[in-house]
Amino acid sequence: MTPTWDTHWFPHAFIGVMEQVQYAVHTATPPELSVADNVRTMALIEAGYRSIAERRPVLLSEFDL
């Protein structure tokens, strides 16, 4: 299943993350942010959207991380 969003995508928001990935590949070192960090970031964003839509606080524990 491929995730989809009904919102706008702002690729410039991920410049730092992508730079870290490229640097890690170039230097054969781990990136500063892990995949798990990025998954939690996306869950936080999704929680914000859900909170707005449902007019309630949304906890990250509501997501399978």
Image (cartoon, rainbow, N blue to C red):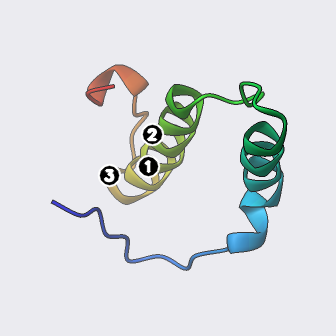
Q: Nearer the viewer, mark 1 or mark 3?
A: 1
Residue 54's label in the rendered image is: 3
Type of the residue with mark 3: Glu
The residue at which mark 2 appears reads as 43
16 vs 33: above or below? below
- Whole-angstrom CA distance, mark 1 to mark 3, is 12 Å
SS state under label 1 = helix
Density class for disc 3 (Cα within 10 Å; few <14, some 14-19, many ≥20) is: few
Type of the residue with mark 2: Ala
Q: Could you tell me which residue is drawn at 77 percent across and 51 percent down? A: 22
Which is more N-terminal, label 3 or label 2?
2
The quadrant of the image that shows the N terminus is bottom left
Residue 46's label in the rendered image is: 1
Name the residue nearer the viewer: 59 or 11: 11
Q: Could you tell me which residue is drawn at 84 percent across and 44 percent down? A: 23
Q: Is residue 22 left or right of residue 59?
A: right
Q: Could you tell me which residue is drawn at 40 percent across and 33 percent down? A: 58
Type of the residue with mark 1: Glu
Report x, y in % for residue 5: 37, 70
Report x, y in % for residue 15: 80, 60
Report x, y in % for residue 26: 81, 44
Q: Could you tell me which residue is drawn at 44 percent across and 49 percent down? A: 46
Which is more N-terminal, label 3 or label 1?
1
SS state under label 2 = helix
Q: Nearer the viewer, mark 2 or mark 3?
A: 2
Name the residue nearer the viewer: 41 or 2: 2
SS state under label 3 = helix
Density class for disc 1 (Cα within 10 Å; few <14, some 14-19, many ≥20) is: some
Q: Is residue 38 left or right of residue 53?
A: right
Density class for disc 2 (Cα within 10 Å; few <14, some 14-19, many ≥20) is: some
Report x, y in % for residue 37: 58, 28
Quarter of the view holding residue 25: top right
